[in-house]
Amino acid sequence: MLTEKKDKTGLFIGAVCLAVLYVFLILLDNVIPQNSFTLLLVPVLKKGAIYSLVCVSMNLLNGFTGLFSLGQAGFMMLGGYAYAIFSIPKDQHAAVYQYFDGGLIQFSIPEALSNVLGESAGAIIGSIICIMIAGIVAAAFAALIGIPVLRLKSDYLAIATLGFAEILRAIFQWSGLGPITNGSNLLRKYTSLSAIKIGSLKLATFFPFFIAGISIALIVLLINSSYGRAFKAIRDDEIAAEAMGINLFRHKMLSFVISSFFAGVGGALLAMFQTTIQATPFKSAMTYELLLIVVIGGIGSISGSCIGAFLFIACNEWWLRFLDNGSFMGMSVPFFRDGFRKVVFSVIIMVIVLFFSKGIMGDREISFAGLARRIRGSKPSGGKEAPAK
């Protein structure tokens, strides 16, 4: 009874924190005046939320199932392209696919729904449908390549998935697929985060947090289910897991497909954030960044992946920017020049890896139930006072 009460208290505190966060994000878009601080804060929040989802999906595969995959950037690219292709307005196809006779798919889901439901509802619901399509496309490709590559282990699996991502990136830039992917040219004019609003209420920052929050919650539910326990058993000892009756290939395929689905969702959100998409940026370096975030946060920790993503984006794109400006607090510093930010950032990463060998969170999670106990004042189990010595 006491445990149930604690669980309810933890859930209540978590729900309140989430509600406060979402209200703040809406205020940030609509009420809080824009200044130099918010202009830097908003992009970091948006990209941090997107990277949190992608890193959690990668952690599901690498941290909880023990499969060393390096194909995440490829699945993000699939999701981003799928989202853009199905959300470019019909009257913009001629401008976007100017070298390929207007493109092959001249249909926009948000535009079609806007004609029926209105502009705001059509943009939101249409974008969500396109995001789902992005995840399904990424999952479908994962199911196809998973049949051969998931029979490999360790470094061989990593090389195979990395090679798949690089091959896919090259294929998407091939002019033969130009009527669909626009070749090596940009895809643009599709529904971006700025179009997500209800009337005059802007939801550009709220939307990626909302989608990422739901997706991460689904991953957490999966990890805490019987399938999640099977994933962990495979990670810890494949032979013992198979002896217990776990179908290794089926569960590996399930983890691979689900991870790729949410990577595709993250790629769609990234496309919405960037307003344009092209295959070139989805290089192996992007996968290494994601893997670095997972390691910094803690392999096997959902909370760690989220914390690591926001810290990585904030340091890389905001907090250390002054190191590239050539001055500090009005004083000229000769070695503060373009690129010095990367040097300092690399040193910070080395320090974290050296002093936090298991990452910031290790394999632990943030517990709102534990926070509730600290607020009330912790007592031994059963609610009785500890005997005086």
Image (cartoon, grey):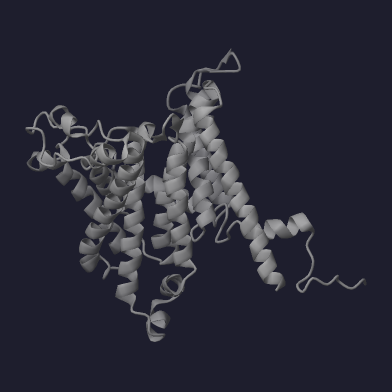
Q: Is residue 54 visible?
A: yes
Q: Quadrant of residue 262?
A: bottom left
**Which x, y percent locates residue 277?**
27, 36
Q: Is residue 101 above or below residue 298?
A: above
Q: Quadrant of the N terminus?
A: bottom right
Q: Is residue 342 visible?
A: no
Q: Viewer-proximal residue, 79 or 94?
A: 94
Q: Residue at x 55, y 55 (%)?
A: 357
**Which x, y percent locates residue 221?**
47, 64
Q: Quadrant of residue 196?
A: top left
Q: Quadrant of residue 183?
A: top left
Q: Viewer-proximal residue, 122 or 193?
A: 122
Q: Quadrant of the C terminus?
A: bottom right
**Which x, y percent locates residue 33?**
55, 22
In this picture, residue 369 sits left or right of residue 341: right
Q: Residue at x 21, y 34 (%)?
A: 89
Q: Viewer-proximal residue, 55 or 360?
A: 55
**Which x, y percent locates residue 373?**
73, 60
Q: Is residue 103 above or below residue 4?
A: above
Q: Is residue 306 above or below residue 43?
A: below
Q: Is residue 327 above or below residue 257?
A: above
Q: Residue at x 43, y 39 (%)?
A: 47
